[in-house]
Image: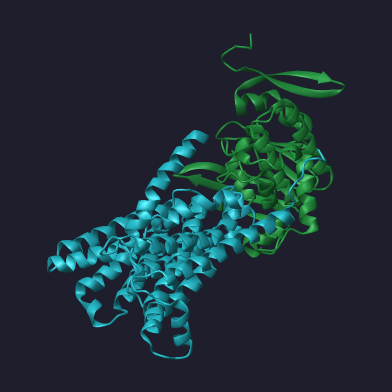
Chain colours: A cyan, B green
Amino acid sequence: MSAVAVPTSASDRMSYWRLVTVLAAATLVMAALSLAVGYARLDLFAALGDWLAGRQSLPALVLVELRLPRAILGALVGFSLGLTGAAMQGLLRNPLAEPGIVGISSAAAFGAVTVFYSGFAGAFALALPLGGIAGALLAVLLLFALNGRGAGTMTLILAGVAINSFAGAMTSLALNLAPNPYAALEIVFWLMGSLADRSLIHVWLVLPLMLVGWVLLLSCAPALDGLTLGEDTARSLGFDLTWLRVRLIGGAALAVGSAVAVTGAIGFVGLVVPHLLRPLVGHRPGRLLLVSGFGGAILLLAADTMLRLMPIRPELKLGVVTALIGAPFLFSLIQRLRREA
Amino acid sequence: MRIEAKGIAIAFDGKPILAGIDLALRPGELVGLIGANGAGKTTLLRILADLLPPASGTVLYDGTSARKLARRALAQRLAFLAQGGSVQWQMRAEAVVALGRLPHRRPFADLTAADKAAISNAFTATDASAFRERSLDSLSGGERMRVLLARALAVEAEMLLADEPLVGLDPRHQLEAMALFRRIAANGTGVVVVLHDLSLAGRFCDRLVLLDGGRILADGPPADVLDDGNLARAFGIEVARGNRDGENFVLPWQALGHGETGR
């Protein structure tokens, strides 16, 4: 027996933090790559020098006005999607759960589409994301109103289904009643999700919301571990599940609601990333959170960098690319699960 | 810790599940909760563990109602083992058993020496150390049940409520689990187990509580509870009785009204 090296919990914990560090470093590398890639040739160091020196040169403007917001938003949105996906899967104890399952993403999309439709979008730059955030908030209020106190996970899923289909129908209605084909096309394109042409203002708008959302979601880690053995066991371990649901839904609304509000709907990241990384953390739902956040950031930055390197113009929408990568991956995952079963 | 339930009643969809339950659970006592399917055993156990609020009646923990206790404080003192043993994510056995320490740990803090000792002791007690490093999906049903039992033991609570902890265990491990419950009780912990095996219940428990149709039909020493009248009424069975080395035992023999035996 003594010949077998038994990994102790200390080395277990160390390998977890090593994994987090590696993924965080990879996120930084991907963000740097995203900065370096673009349609215009850019001497990054010269641009950075100009910017730091306060010179309003063209390279500095390209860097700060175009590349930097794109890279930062890619990381923020990817992190939000990966983290929320892992948290939702933990809460619902279902590997097929994704950030949008409780209806927050589609409600945020509907909020933004309403702004589009009403014509406010042209009035000022932040109207669109603010509309999205309002939609997400509305969905959360509706969720809590529908669930009331002490309602279970099943009610939550059903309420999510209802909100999803309602918001989807209203979005279709807006397209249906669009004043002209161009307006409809604009809405459709926005819905596909993209990081193009966003500015630092968008970053400052969503960053605080996302940070609060992340903290709320990460605080759920111990309770999600406890939930592994079912709701009764989790409660017997001292966790208040109503409070857990409030924190998790609130965190998801802040993180994903604001993500959808600035970039449109980007699917598959929140579903696929937790799946991919789960074996690396010993299937522990609490540890999956942070790791999935970084994984989501890496995947989204990689997809966004790839679509700019592809010789297709106009550039593909990010939501389309993540779905194109995600779907075959999901097929292979199903295949593997079937073999294991 | 003493648990006192007074006047407990609950109904689901208008159908009464429990009515007029008065029950006191003491430290150092191994109590077997027995009764036919649907008699209300699981519901009663969940109410005793503060997982389900009764429609009427009160449950007091050392004289205090759960509403006045912090859930975490209660979680440190009362361990609950759920029926069926579903585990969603295929974690390693060690990580599962470590979940039992959650009520004692500061969030995000590392396992302390006390935590590690409790986990190791729980593995040893359930004879599960051999698969400590294995993932739960690679274990058999009985092995998994032993890991889940170890999880509940790792809480090191003053009161352990276990819902059918013997399901899936082979005869040897059933006997060992009952002996383990008796040892834990002898060390001062209150233990309540829902059981279907009347032989084991009669031999190992200090006291049996027999539920029938949501009411307590009998509550007392096994010899008194397992009398022919009670068994006929609660289960509709006849038992064979025997004695080995001065110890009485019962063996379910035939369903009443059928006259069929094993032959």
Instruction: Please give the name of the residue rendered at 35% of the width and 57% of the height, measured from the top-left corner.
Output: A321
Q: Is residue A107 above or below residue B42?
A: below
Q: Residue furthest top?
A: B263
Q: Looking at the image, which residue sits at the far right?
A: B245
Farthest residue to the left: give it.
A180
Measured as percent of width and height from the top left, residue B14 is found at 45, 44
The one of A236 and B148 positioned closer to us in this rendering: B148
> Which residue corresponds to the image point at 45% horizontal and 91% vertical from the top-left?
A54
Question: Is residue B157 positioned above or below A203 on the image?
Answer: above
Task: Determine if residue A341 is in view.
Answer: no
Residue A177 point in image, percent of width and height:
14, 64
Q: Quarter-wise, where is residue B182 in the image?
A: top right
Q: How many marks?
A: 0
Q: Which quadrant would the C terminus of chain B be assigned to in this image?
A: top right
Asked if residue A270 lies left or right of residue B248, the reply is left
The reply to whether residue B29 is in sight is yes
**Residue at left 78%, top 47%?**
B120
Residue at the far bottom in the pictured view: A54
- Across and down, in percent, residue A33 comes to 46, 67
State the residue in front, B195 or A134. Answer: A134
- Quadrant containing the N terminus of chain B in the rendered view: bottom right
From the viewer's side, name the closer residue of A314 and A227: A314
- Answer left or right for A133 relative to B60: left
Left or right position of A192 against B1: left
Quadrant housing residue B178: top right
